[in-house]
Amino acid sequence: MAQTNALFDGWGVIHDAAKRLPGADLKLAFIEALAELEDHECHRTRKFPKTRLHRVVGYKEAVYRADIDKVSGWRIHVQYEEGGQVHLKDIVEGRKHDDVLGQIEAKKIRYQRPKTKGKRD
């Protein structure tokens, strides 16, 4: 049996995708993208053939984006937390995916790391 990594959905990204994705084909592609993000082998080898997971350049926190469907432009934003946990942060519409930093800034509370006691900025 294949080893899987847990996905954490503290922001309701899966529910949001079920409401917002316009067609059954994109909903199926979303499920396939989640399956690839759960696949431990993809994380071990750092190869994501379907989602093309890659880091967002130009933002101080490490945010990654994964394709749901390359042609339509729908994307999933994720972050790795302690212990390699994958946290779903947002789903981005196709027509808004080019302004990636603007999308992150609009919901920046989702992307901020929790502050730990005893550490100063």
Image (cartoon, rainbow, N blue to C red):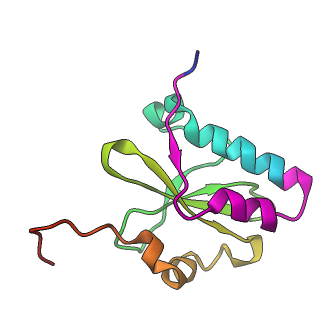
Numbered circles on residues, count = 0
Could one spot residue 78 in this view of the protein? Answer: yes
Whether 72 is among the magenta residues is no
Could one spot residue 49 in this view of the protein? Answer: no
Whether 23 is among the magenta residues is yes
Relative to residue 87, is residue 114 drawn left or right? left
Determine the residue positioned at 45% across, 63% down.
Answer: 63
Q: Who is closer to the viewer here, 107 or 71?
A: 107
Relative to residue 70, is residue 6 drawn left or right? left
Determine the residue positioned at 72% across, 54% down.
Answer: 68
Q: Is residue 2 above or below residue 81?
A: above
Q: Which residues are magenta?
A: 3-26
Relative to residue 119, is residue 23 drawn left or right? right
Give the quadrant of the N terminus. Answer: top right
Residue 42 in picture, x, y percent from top left: 53, 34
Determine the residue positioned at 68% across, 46% down.
Answer: 33
Residue 47 in picture, x, y percent from top left: 54, 37
Residue 22 in picture, x, y percent from top left: 87, 65
Q: Is residue 98 above or below residue 68?
A: below
Residue 46 in picture, x, y percent from top left: 47, 38
